[in-house]
Amino acid sequence: SRKAPLVIVRPVQRGACPIDKGVPIVFSTYQEARPYLINCIGSYCSYCGMRLDASLAVEHVQPKSSRPALRLRWENFLLACTNCNSVKKDKRVGIRTVFWPDRDNTQRAFRYGPGGLIEVNPTLSTAERRRAQATMDLVGLDRTPDARPNASDRRWLSRQRAWERARDARRRLLIPRNNTPHFRSQIIDTAKEAGFWPIWFTVFEGNRDMTRRLIRAFPGTATDCFDSQLNLVVRPGGLL
């Protein structure tokens, strides 16, 4: 039987609105924010974690159709791939209804297992589990070809491949002759190219040096989601 897909939402820190000539930029179109967002949080979908170049759009946390006042506001922008953006569409979702990658420690919402098995973190409270499920539903992160055939939605396949690459990298790192700073840097380069940061974080959990490298390597990863020992903690001001 097909294994469940990885559900991955990296907690990110967008930062304050970019400055130009000493004052915050006023965007005339939301598309203008794209290069600034990429600079702050990397060329990755804020929801599924896929790395993209051209097909990465500025996404509105609160839909511009129902919240026109937020159409050009930096704090309402994230980045999304075609699939996540098209599934989310203009859904009106309350800030406290789901977990948001720019507000919560979304890495804590789910539990990952061998082979990419995923489930809502059973240690969460009942209300938190509802929000975690709603997070999956918001952009269709739990979709598989079996459940909803769609040839254009290959997020599930990309996630499985990233999991396999991460597991292979960890196995090779366990070989004594490979356990060098250079090889560790090569793994980080592969992770940045592959995307899906939480997969790599999960696979290398327990290896403090590698998890620290991953946090530093992916732009905008929210460092306040980790304690001094790199354990996941509740994000200040967030729901998780």
Image (spheres, grey):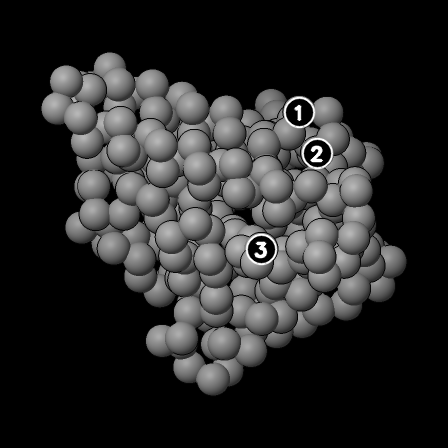
**Helix, strand or loop for disc 2:** strand
Above or below, 229 against 166 in this view is below
Earlier residue among tags 3 and 1: 3
The kind of residue tagged 2 is: Leu
Check contact, mark 3 vs mark 1: CB within 8 A. no
- Report x, y in % for residue 5: 56, 53
Q: Is residue 203 left or right of residue 7?
A: left
| Residue 56 disc label | 2
Whether 208 is drawn above or below 65: the answer is above
Q: Amino acid at mark 1?
A: Asp
Q: Position of residue 180 (x, y in %)?
A: 17, 19
Q: Are the two marked residues, 2 and 3, in contact with CB atoms closer than 8 angstroms?
A: no
Q: Residue at x 58, y 71 (%)?
A: 133
Q: Quadrant of residue 136?
A: bottom right
Vertically, is 5 above or below 57? Answer: below
Q: Give the side of residue 87 with respect to residue 1, left or right.
A: right
From the image, tell me which residue sits under label 1.
Answer: 53
Viewer-closest of 70 and 90: 90
Who is closer to the viewer here, 108 or 236?
108
Front residue of this view, candidates 179 and 210: 179
Alpha-carbon span between mark 1 and mark 2? 6 Å
Q: Position of residue 83 (x, y in %)?
A: 74, 46
User: Within the image, what quadrant is residue 199 found in?
Assistant: top left
